[in-house]
Image (spheres, helix red, strand yellow):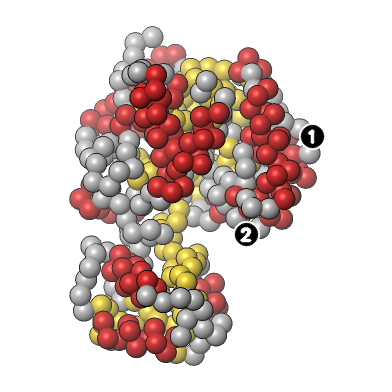
Amino acid sequence: MRKIRTVFSSAGILVPEFHSDSAKMARWATIAVDQFTSQPEYWEKCREIAGDAPSTLGFVMPEAYLGTKLETEHKPEILMNMERFDPSGYHAFDGLVYLRRYLPDGIRCGIVGKIDLEEYSYVPGERCRVRPTEKTVVERIPPRVEIRKEASCELPHILVLCDDKAGIFSLAEELVSDEGPLYDFDLMLGGGHITGYEITGEKLFRLMAKIAGNEKMNRELPYAVGDGNHSLAAAKAHWENVKKEQGVTDGPARYVLCEITPVMSDAIEFEPIYRLIKNCDTGDLKERILEASELYDGPDAVRFISGNEEFSFRFRKQTHALVLGTLQNFIDSYLGGREGPVCDYIHGLDTVKKLAQVPGSAALICGGIEKKDLFSYVEKNGVLPRKTFSMGHAESKRYYLEMRAIR
């Protein structure tokens, strides 16, 4: 088969041998570990559903377990599964997976393959072709690198956004129109339905040619990371270590498995993330805001809500390209000189309004960014302020499903 060099390409993909058994696959796939972090009961339901059946939960550590006895109890299971991992026990192919994820907001299409880490960087200002959309917290990387260094396989929850000018996904839909699915099942605990198709051979070549054309059309920035950037950053840091220690320029560590999806899909919603200042003197916070702003009720206003008090304003001096960035800079400055107050990041307008009724709490509400503006913003300005947007609800995040051997 002819090879086409691209940033995103086909991979040696593994799925369970029982991939056509919908009941077994429903127990196999579990949601990204960075969801439901304050709800260990969600993860206990996952465990109850999986039972003794093979499950991706046996390969990952839910963040809800960290720092609890559940972490200690679950870690040996992960280590055992990594040690016993044998690719020959899985259905394996070199190709891509085209998938449809059926969600309340519509059908989100995606393609699973691998990203070349030589084309990605989490260092601010680097003009690479795969870029994070939000600032990478470098302190989170070393623990993840240690895990990846010892891991025998990877399971992605990385979701990478693609500006699909060339029609990649319409071609993929055409290519699988007469194919039987690789898997087709209901995801557990409200995750919707998912159907995936194996793409290999001549169909793979046609799709890779379309991907190459789209990357050429988006020469500066074909991909922007939506979810899972710290996993991608850990893979990059590990690859840099491997290059330095082993003196190699290629190998399994150079790549990371992920899903790409078109940013302009109707099923992808950019939802704002609101700021809640807790444990604060709300009168003092209000005073500091009014010193730096003027009352304003336009479309780009910031709303202050605390108890029964509410007003809208805009900062006189904009310190960031986005209103949200200026607001975040103000919050960071305000919190920097005080003990006690903290900023929490809240999904849902009704939720943040309710929390703003708690004594000592104030909500600061403004929009984030429109998805149509994402690529142009990142290309021009770099990463967004932290917690600028969320792509849908927790249940719509990526589930662990496909695997790739990395050792």
Is residue 9 visible to us here? no
Query: Which amino acid does the dot numbered 2 rest on?
Result: Ser
| Quarter where residue 54 is shown | top right
Dot 1 corresponds to which residue? 52
Query: Which amino acid does the dot numbered 1 rest on?
Result: Asp
Is residue 373 visible to us here? yes
Q: Nearer the viewer, mark 1 or mark 2?
A: 2
Going 26% across and 28% down the picture, which residue do you hit? Answer: 213
Across and down, in percent, residue 95 comes to: 46, 20
Going 56% across and 82% down the picture, which residue do you hit? Answer: 358
SS class of the residue under badge 1?
A: loop
User: Front-most of 331 and 387?
Assistant: 331
Dot 2 corresponds to which residue? 38
| Quarter where residue 373 is shown | bottom left
Going 65% across and 50% down the picture, which residue do you hit? Answer: 65
What is the spatial separation of the Cα atoms under label 1 and label 2, in whole angstroms? 25 Å
